[in-house]
């Protein structure tokens, strides 16, 4: 689940928790009073299911909506837009099957999603469907309740805490439009993923995250509703899956896993039942979808190879054990950067290949049109599954990989980069740069701009200026930083030079004990409080303590923040800190994502200092990801790999 700003008052947390509890009571009462049922209490549905008349094959009409990026960035989600695109891509394949004459789809994501575009699409796009056709609606994003009016809204891209009434889609209006669509077609299938309460951080006290309105939707016979969570729960986004858990289960079901009797057809009941069972398995019991079915069961999808059903699912929250047959449809503009290979295989230049990966990842992460996958998570997924990088990219839903090679002759380095389509494995574009090793940063920036052109990504003026900006960056200082972060190989510590904690210019005795005691108190309080956002708050505190300890060059405090801290890492960090006079450290664009029992924290680190040897000012920038885990009740950074 993507991290959001965690400046939330205690009263606001209680408001969210109270709203979800009340929503849960209302929704459960509503569901038991109708024909739907929460997970674990699925009502039996007759196996007899209707299909579109054979004489006039139906058309499947799909409106798929997902908002990951909001104008108010604190609302941002990670996979909602990708979820909408992948659902559309999967259902589009039904047009080549035996069930539908054609599939017509309209996908709206991010900036395309406005109040007007949603209502207009329901009216004019789905309004074209005929009486024998099936309409499907998928919506992923934020749903909130305005406590002042009691109204529920879906948040499109322009929505903020201040303009909710004018820009939000009132759920009662959405429900009314769905009723109109249902009146004109054979059946309507609605799939809603709008309860991301754990991700939503709204400063206005009169808004609460809510999922109750989905329980009230009803359009009569031929109306089928599947919601991502039962009331009171959060909808979880999983980086290891490349999707929200709800969408991942939907994709599995539509690709064959829901066809339990292997008859080649998936009914709405089959699909909903599979998702209801699968999501709790993917989330360790933290999320339970619920469904509502009004009328006779409906054959919704055909399976191309009915005999091939995906492997039995794991029953614990062990995400690396996801069944291998499933390949997620990649989202547009999802990028992974791989390590560059040294053609001459010279150990002294091994760091360049790793540094290129980090540098390109840092620059590409500045482009809002791209979703750049963390190298650390790519590597962890590859290692845990024991597969190649291309298979990992397909599994994670990464569309393009950027990789390449380099070689150094004297002081000259040549870098060759290529773009690989993960679906086909075909190289789609390449470019090369060459220059002095000391011009490393200018070369990699030139390469980034070339790759963006070949990817047909348009940069804003600010993004282009940020990438093209030339900074005073010493290559040796940058290498030391990467060594200290464990991203490139570190030299073995010299026996004659034991690890030092007395970095010049740093007061030691009182600072060590004081900051350790204060940081320990803050982190322990955050862990002990355990509100809904306690892990994110504790993770943010760990990272802030880490930043402050860097500025104060406190190796003891830095080591205490890790689960393990090797002598090599201490020596590399000491060397870096020793070279940086007047060090100022900034962490920007911090994102915190729960991932099983861990917290994935990504941020852009910017260091400014004067190089002690040359006397020149330096500015280093790098995008980093750290994995935090609990140790004796305290969140700590996992040791360097």
Image: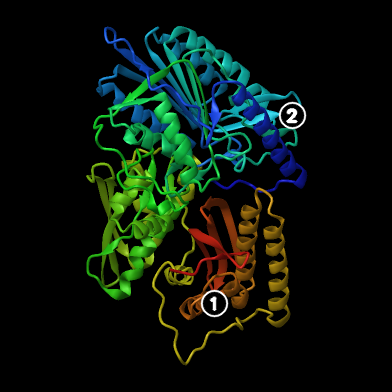
Picture residue at 54% right of the left edge, 21% below the top: 35
339 vs 367, nearest the viewer: 339
Tell whether label 2 touches label 1 (CB within 8 Å). no
Picture residue at 62% right of the left edge, 74% below the top: 557
Q: Position of residue 123 (x, y in %)?
A: 49, 12
**Label 2 residue SS:** loop
556 vs 532, nearest the viewer: 532
Q: Position of residue 609 (x, y in %)?
A: 57, 68
Residue at the bottom extreme, as displayed: 496
Disc ID at residue 612: 1
Q: Which residue is mark 2?
A: 147
Quadrant for the C terminus, please: bottom left
On the picture, is 53 further left or further right than 548?
left
Please state which of the two labelled residues, at mark 1 or mark 2, is closer to the viewer.
2
Residue 174 sits above or below residue 550 on the image: above
**How far is the residue under mark 1 from the one under mark 2?**
57 Å
On the picture, is 53 further left or further right than 38?
left
Q: Position of residue 321 (x, y in %)?
A: 38, 52
């Amino acid at each position: 689940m993507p991290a959001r700003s965690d400046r939330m008052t205690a009263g606001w947390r209680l408001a969210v928790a109270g709203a979800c509890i009340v929503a849960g009571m209302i929704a459960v009462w509503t569901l038991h009073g109708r024909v739907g049922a929460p997970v674990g209490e699925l009502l039996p549905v007759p196996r007899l299911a209707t299909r579109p008349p054979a004489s006039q094959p139906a058309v499947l009409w799909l409106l798929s909506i997902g908002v990951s990026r909001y104008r108010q960035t604190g609302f941002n989600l990670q996979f909602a837009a990708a979820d909408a695109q992948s659902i559309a891509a999967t259902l589009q394949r039904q047009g080549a099957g035996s069930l539908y004459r054609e599939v017509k789809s309209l996908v709206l994501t991010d900036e395309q999603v406005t109040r007007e575009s949603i209502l207009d699409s329901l009216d004019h796009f789905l309004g074209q469907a005929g009486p024998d056709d099936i309409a499907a609606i998928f919506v992923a994003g934020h749903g909130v309740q305005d406590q002042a009016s009691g109204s529920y809204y879906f948040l499109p891209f322009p929505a903020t805490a201040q303009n909710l009434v004018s820009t939000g889609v009132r759920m009662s209006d959405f429900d009314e439009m769905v009723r109109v669509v249902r009146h004109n077609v054979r059946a309507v299938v609605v799939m809603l993923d709008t309860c991301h309460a754990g991700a939503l951080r709204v400063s206005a006290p009169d808004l609460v995250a809510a999922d109750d309105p989905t329980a009230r939707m009803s359009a009569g016979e031929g109306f089928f509703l599947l919601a991502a969570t039962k009331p009171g729960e959060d909808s979880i986004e999983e980086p290891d899956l490349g999707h929200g858990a709800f969408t991942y289960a939907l994709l599995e079901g539509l690709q064959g896993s829901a066809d339990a009797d292997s008859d080649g057809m998936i009914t709405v009941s089959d699909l909903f039942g599979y998702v209801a069972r699968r999501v709790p398995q993917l989330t360790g019991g933290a999320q339970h979808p619920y469904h509502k079915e009004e009328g006779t069961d409906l054959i919704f999808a055909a399976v191309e190879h009915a005999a091939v059903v995906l492997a039995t699912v794991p029953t614990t929250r062990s995400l690396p054990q996801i069944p291998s047959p499933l390949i997620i449809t990649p989202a547009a503009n999802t990028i992974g950067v791989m390590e560059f290979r040294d053609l001459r295989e010279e150990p002294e230049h091994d760091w360049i290949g790793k540094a290129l990966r980090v540098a390109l990842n840092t620059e590409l992460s500045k482009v809002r049109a791209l979703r750049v996958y963390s190298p650390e998570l790519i590597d962890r997924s590859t290692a845990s599954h024991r597969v190649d990088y291309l298979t990992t990219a397909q599994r994670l839903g990464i569309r393009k990989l950027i990789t390449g090679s380099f070689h150094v002759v004297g002081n000259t380095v040549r870098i060759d980069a290529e773009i690989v389509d993960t679906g086909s494995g075909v190289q789609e574009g390449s470019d090369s740069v060459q220059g002095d090793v000391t011009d490393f940063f200018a070369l990699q920036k030139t390469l980034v701009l070339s790759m963006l052109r070949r990817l047909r990504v348009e940069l804003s003026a600010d993004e282009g200026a940020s990438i093209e900006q030339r900074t005073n960056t010493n290559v040796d200082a940058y290498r030391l930083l990467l060594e200290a972060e464990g991203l490139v190989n570190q030299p073995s510590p010299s026996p004659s030079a034991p690890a030092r904690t007395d970095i010049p210019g740093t007061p030691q005795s009182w600072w060590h004990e004081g900051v350790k005691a204060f940081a320990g108190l803050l982190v322990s309080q955050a862990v002990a409080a355990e509100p809904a956002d306690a892990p994110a708050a504790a993770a943010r505190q760990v990272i802030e303590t880490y930043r402050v300890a860097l500025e104060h060059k406190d190796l003891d405090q830095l080591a205490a923040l890790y689960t393990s801290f090797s002598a090599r890492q201490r020596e590399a960090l000491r060397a870096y800190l020793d070279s940086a006079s007047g060090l100022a450290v900034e962490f920007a664009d911090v994102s915190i994502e729960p991932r099983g029992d861990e917290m994935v924290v990504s941020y852009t680190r910017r260091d400014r200092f004067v190089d002690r040897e040359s006397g020149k000012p330096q500015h280093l920038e790098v995008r980093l990801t750290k994995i935090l885990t609990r140790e004796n009740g305290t969140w700590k950074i996992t040791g360097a790999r």
